[in-house]
Amino acid sequence: MLAFIDRLSDICGKLAAAMFFVIGGMIAYEVVARYVFISPTIWAEELSRFIQIWATYLGAAYVLRHRHLIAIDLLTGRLGPTMRALSEALGLVFVAVFCGMAIVYGTGIVVESIQMGRATATMLSVPQWMTESAVPIGFSILLLQCLAELARIVARRRLPQNGTDA
């Protein structure tokens, strides 16, 4: 199961990276269309924002899996292995609780948008649920990765440490 979660996070991370690349192309196209041909698009700004939201939430689990989060090592670098593992586990628990809340409230917002038929107030009139769905989906994947990382911490702590644990 851990391998599946890791693969899912990696796939989402690579998809997010590709999406950010596409955003760069869309913005470049919009700049050329607007300032060179004096013919701005009606889609570039909204679609790039839409893709950016999805890319951000899809990439979160990848960032956690590969430990590319911003970290302050001033205190944790001075802790022994046991306290460092406990500190890391506590951080993951807080992230997991936040993920759960975001999933619950985000899903409620998506359902409400579908029921009300909300759409963006732009010329494209994209249904809001298409953007809002990124929150519960992205946080669900992040929650899975949090649980996988917590399982790894627990598994590492159960391995014999030759009495060198501080």
Image: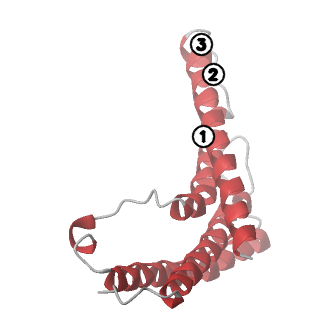
The residue at 66%/53% (across/down) is: 120
Q: Quadrant of residue 58?
A: bottom right
Give the camera-side residue of 158 and 85: 158
Question: What's the residue type where badge 3 is placed?
Answer: Ile
- Relative vertical location of residue 97 with respect to residue 68 in this rendering, above or below: below
Q: Residues within 10 Å of mark 3 (few under 14, many from 20)?
A: few
The mark closer to the camera, 1 or 3, is 1
- Spatial CA span between label 1 and label 2: 14 Å
Residue 20's tag is 1
N-terminal of the pair, mark 1 or mark 3, is 1
Q: Label for residue 29?
A: 2
Residue 48 visible to the viewer: yes
Mark 1 surroundings: few (<14), some (14-19) or many (≥20) residues within 10 A? some
Which of 132 and 144 lies nearest the eye of the viewer? Answer: 144
**In the displayed structure, would residue 67 be above or below residue 76?**
above
Q: Which of the marked residues, 2 or 3, is nearer the chain's N terminus?
A: 2
Query: Can you say which quadrant of the picture contains the C terminus?
Result: bottom left
For the residues labelled 1 and 3, say whether their Cβ atoms are less than 8 Å apart: no
Secondary structure of the residue carrying numbered label 3? loop
Residue at 75 percent across and 69 percent down: it is 4
Secondary structure under the numbered disc 1 in the rendered image: helix
Q: From what the image shows, is residue 134 above or below residue 18?
A: below
Residue 1, image x, y percentages? 75, 77
Q: Position of residue 15 (x, y in %)?
A: 69, 48
Question: What percent of the width, then of the height, locates residue 64?
Answer: 52, 64
Q: Specify the quadrant of the image occupied by residue 78.
A: bottom left
Q: How many angstroms separate mark 2 from mark 3 (CA)?
A: 12 Å
Residue at numbered disc 3: 38
